[in-house]
Image (cartoon, grey):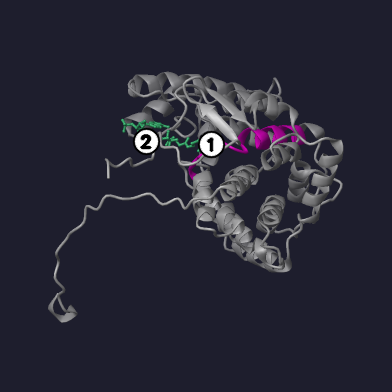
Amino acid sequence: MTGVNRGLDGVAVAETRLSTMDGEAGELIIGGFPVEELADNATFEETLYLLFRGRLPDAEELSAFRSDLAECRAIGDEVLAVLRRAAEEEKPAMDALRMGAAAANLGTEDGDPEADALRVVAAFPTIVAAYWRYRVGEEPIEPDPDLGHAANYLYMLTGERPDERAVRGLETYLNAVVDHGLNASTFTARVVVSTESDVVSAATAAVGTLKGPLHGGAPGPVLDMLKEIHESGDPEAYVREKLEGDERLMGFGHRIYRVRDPRAAVLEAAAEQFYDDDDDFFETITDFENVAVDLLAEYKPDRDLETNVEFYTAALLHGVGVPQELFPATFGIARVGGWMAHALEQLEDNRLIRPESRYTGERGRSWTPIEER
Ligand code: ACO
């Protein structure tokens, strides 16, 4: 065995047609499209179709795909019971999503990976919205078959039909973050199905991976940070205090990108429209970004720490009206499209993913009976 690569940097364990990044140039391609083009133009259903089937649908195919999704959007009473309990105990939304996702094979007799994958993708917004309704002391709202995926999520959160601008803002977000190479949660999903386990198990494990603050858990803390700075008006003092205390600034740094994450620009442009001229919160956000990037370069001169996707995720989702507690789960609503497409791709030409570890423990111990320890 050669040396240990603790974070698996630079190791390719799969071939994929789904997405690729150039970390030096700051480019992201999803299903053949630059992220900028896909995010701004596609509905989320078109993006899902693109990932699942490898090309854009025509109008008839899109309409059939939308109906297929609509048919599996509802969730059963047993799932609602778990979500109610999670909400009553004030468990985080990601825990509720993991528990809800795990129940997605109840009441089905499929075992057909593509049908299961579609059902998981369709159910995610319903699960998150139902949990949220319980959290705010309301009953869940059933999905509306006339609304698309993004619109349904907003509708099920509030009970009100969302306006076009909010739907477009959310779709831009969902498209921009649907897939991103072999990030930690997608890797998890591929590892799970590589054992010939099922796609529902893959989605459940991937939710657990996405939950962590080094992956999908950053945008909530980013919003807290932005609110604090908006109040204090002193971004420099905030950043210096964090960096001098050896803390990480949420929303900055990335394993792949050495330059600004290309999704940051997409989300920044989409977010700006939600903040009108007499609301200087957006100005706080952009000013803070500039100060943070300059100070990260000062404190960590040998690192290229630039803005990552989570920074403007906070600004956009806040603008769209998604509750802060649901930011990571909303990331899951997008990324599950990528997880499921990767899981299906892995199954097309599967080989068990099974790396190695280097043993650093003891050897040659001899057993001591318990009464002698
Ligand atoms: N603030 C301050 N310092 C940082 C930051 C940051 N945001 N990110 C990395 N660093 C520093 C580390 O302290 C380390 O410095 P050192 O070598 O002097 O100790 C160096 O940069 C390298 O850090 P690693 O953790 O090895 O880099 P890695 O590639 O593993 O980190 C990560 C990537 C986890 C995203 C990191 O940049 C981070 O923690 N960022 C903040 C959390 C965040 O924004 N998460 C969302 C990520 S985007 C996504 O998952 C969709």
Estimate how packed mark 1 is, as few (under 14), some (14 to 19) or many (20 or more) residues with alpha carbons within 10 Å: many
Q: The residue tagged with tag 2: helix, strand or loop? A: loop
The dot on residue 181 is: 1
SS for callout 1: loop
- Queried whether the magenta region covers residue 180, the answer comes back as yes
Left or right: where does residue 255 sit relative to residue 58? left
| Disc number placed over residue 247 in the picture, else none | 2
Placement of 360 over or under 335, stated as above or below: below
Residue 233 badge: none
Residue 325, horizontal then vertical, whole percent: 59, 47
Kindly identify the amino acid type of the residue bearing the numbered disc 1. Gly
Part of the protein shown in magenta: 166-184
Q: Distance between the Cα atoms at labels 2 and 1? A: 27 Å
Total count of labels: 2
Q: Which is more foreground, mark 2 or mark 1?
A: 1
Q: Where is residue 211 in the image (x, y as percent from the top left)?
A: 51, 48
The kind of residue tagged 2 is Glu
Confirm or reject: label 2 Cβ below 8 Å from ligand 1.
yes
Residue nearest the viewer, comparing 174 with 285: 174
Q: Which residue is drawn at 61% across and 63% down?
A: 88
Closer to the camera, 221 or 37?
A: 37
Magenta: main secondary structure equals helix
